[in-house]
Each structure stands twice: as structure tokens, then as C-alpha cells.
Image (tube, helix red, strand yellow):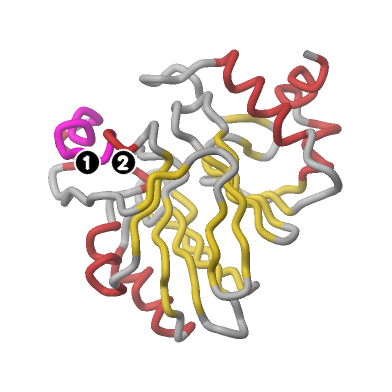
Amino acid sequence: MVINVLTVGMLMTNCYIAMDEKTKEAIVIDPGARAEKIIAAIKEMEANVKYIVFTHAHYDHIMAAHEVLEATGAKIAIHKDDAYLLKKDEVTKFGRYTTAKYVEVTPDVLLEDGDKLEVGELTFDILNTPGHSNGCICLVCEDVIFSGDTLFKGTCGRCDLVNGDLDKMYVSLKKIADLEGDYRVLPGHESPTTLEYERHYNEYMMDAMKR
């Protein structure tokens, strides 16, 4: 798997392009802004984008989706519990200054916990990890967890927004911690980490493991 990370937007969202090197089929995760930058990277990789996937539907993860969709013809995939948040009326609740240019996209695939997305010879396993929002997901492929805003290096996603829930976050962190073995963790913001590091040094995950 080839992974290209592009940090975009005012909140420095990590957008990932993950491609099966053999078939060139790819997935775009969280196109939050700077569509032209994302599209240029797709072209440079010569990738055939099959899915645009949101780890959740907060505006900083979705704002460039419509342009990437127009450029690729990919299918939009999101967890069913966050799908309604793609409506323009919902997005602009975050503040019209930052979301006025949002163009609504309609999901083609409503994901649930345990689903799989096949991209070339890659399989992305979907874990529903509520806490930051009800429809938060992590995508697990090979030795990588794309953790969205659930798990960050040394911390977790904030739980004080609409549909945030700290108790659910602890359940989600334990679910991730219980995965067998080690993984690279690629979060929705900031720097990468590893699951083994988080098991030993992330106080939120350590608390979750004790529950």
C-alpha cells in the first residue's frame, strides 16, 4: 500500500490517499480542503480513486469532497450515523465564515461497524468508534489504522461537540487497543504514532484498557 498524506485547511487536517500499488486503485480519506492539491496528488500517483471516505462528517474533513468527486467519479462512503451531517444546513452550523463554500455531497455507501471496503487487492476494515461523533470510524488496512479524530498521539478526539460522548470514547479506545499486534496509527490531525506506543503512554487509552 502506498500512502500519500496531505495536510490541508485551517485546522491542518490530514487527508490520506491510500493506493494499491499493483492495480492503482485508491481511496481518499478526509478531503478537508485544498481540492486542487488533493487532485494534483491523485494525478501524480496515477491513481484510480474508487472511494472517498470520511472518518466523520465535521466540516474540516469534508469541505473539498465535491471537487474531488467531480474529478474522480468515486463513491462517497460514510458511517450511517454521520450521514445526515453532510447536509449543508448541518455543515453551516459550524460557522458560515468557514463553511459558506460547502457543496453538499450525497453518500453512495452507508458504512456500519464490521464492513469492508475492497480497493484493488487491499481490504479496509471499518471500525465504528463513536465518542468524537456517533459516526466516527477507523479504517484498518494491513499494518495501518487511519484513526480520524478518535485517536491521536498521546490523546484522543474532543468529546464536547454535538454527539460527543466521553464514555463512548473510552469504549472506542478500548476497542482499538484490543486489536492484536502493533499498527501504525495515522490520525486526522497532527503526527503519526503507533498503537503500541499509545497502549503504554496515552493516558486516555490506558484508562480505557482498565475498564
The kind of secondary structure the magenta stretch mainly shows is helix
Magenta-colored span: 85-94
Question: In the image shown, does 135 or 152 lie closer to the viewer?
Answer: 135
Residue located 18% across and 34% down the image: 92
Is residue 90 inside the magenta stretch? yes
Q: Which mark is residue 98?
A: 1
At label 2, counting other C-alpha atoms closer than 10 Å, the crowd grade (few under 14, some 14-19, many 20 or more) is: many
Residue located 82% across and 34% down the image: 199
Where is residue 211? Give x, y as percent: 78, 13
Residue located 63% across and 38% down the image: 152
Q: Secondary structure at mark 2?
A: helix
Q: Secondary structure at mark 1?
A: helix
Q: CA distance from mark 2 to mark 1?
A: 9 Å
Where is residue 95? Give x, y as percent: 20, 31
Where is residue 109? Give x, y as percent: 37, 51
Q: Which mark is residue 144?
A: none
In the image: residue 196, left or right of residue 123 = right
Question: In the image shown, does 131 or 201 lie closer to the viewer?
Answer: 131
Where is residue 75? Give x, y as percent: 34, 62
In the image: residue 176, left or right of residue 53 = right
At label 1, counting other C-alpha atoms closer than 10 Å, the crowd grade (few under 14, some 14-19, many 20 or more) is: some
User: Which quadrant holds the N terminus?
Assistant: bottom right
Q: Is residue 62 above or below residue 199?
A: below
Q: Amino acid at mark 1?
A: Thr
Q: Nearer the viewer, mark 2 or mark 1?
A: 2
How many discs mark residues in the rendered view?
Answer: 2
Q: Which residue is mark 2?
A: 59
Is residue 159 inside the magenta stretch? no
Q: Are marks 2 and 1 in contact (CB under 8 Å)?
A: yes
Which numbered disc, 2 or 1, marks the residue that appears first in the sequence?
A: 2
